[in-house]
Amino acid sequence: MNNTFTAELASRVGSTIEIATDNNLIEGVLASVSLGVVLVIETGGYSDSNRRYIALNAINFVRFSSAA
């Protein structure tokens, strides 16, 4: 995966993020970025905090929420 993409994600740890893959749309807080994987703590849904590990090469796009 592109080092620039990884570095940009790493600089935004703690931000609210939306990640799209081929099969899922994950919304939550970007918790960490490591070699080839991001960790998102999902917000909303039926559980208080679901941890989702997503392979960087599975990500189609990301969107960060804008501050009001």
Image: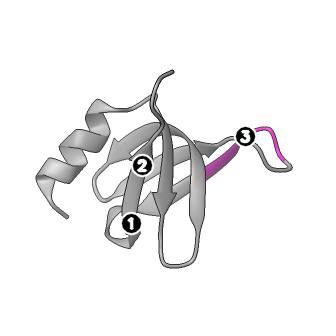
Report the front residue among 4 and 34: 4
Q: Is residue 49 magenta?
A: yes
Q: Amino acid at mark 2?
A: Arg
Could you tell whether 27 is left or right of 37 in the image?
Answer: right
Q: Residue at x 19, y 42 (%)?
A: 7
Q: Secondary structure at mark 1?
A: loop
Q: Quadrant of residue 8?
A: top left
Q: Which residues are magenta?
A: 47-51
Structural crowding at the residue carrying mark 2, measured as other residues with C-alpha within 10 Å and reported as few (<14), some (14–19) or many (≥20): few
Q: Secondary structure at mark 3?
A: loop
Which residue is tagged 3?
49
Q: CA distance from mark 1 to mark 3?
A: 21 Å
Query: Where 12 sits versus 51, above or below?
Result: above
> Quick one: label 2 or label 3, which is nearer the N terminus?
3
Which residue is tagged 1?
59
Q: Quadrant of residue 37?
A: bottom left
Q: Residue at x 56, y 77 (%)?
A: 23
Give residue 47's position: percent from left, percent from top.
83, 46
Could you tell whether 58 is left or right of 45 in the image?
Answer: left
Q: Are marks 1 and 3 in contact (CB under 8 Å)?
A: no
Give residue 18's position: percent from left, percent from top.
51, 50
Q: Residue at x 42, y 49 (%)?
A: 63
Which residue is tagged 2?
63
Q: Secondary structure at mark 2?
A: strand
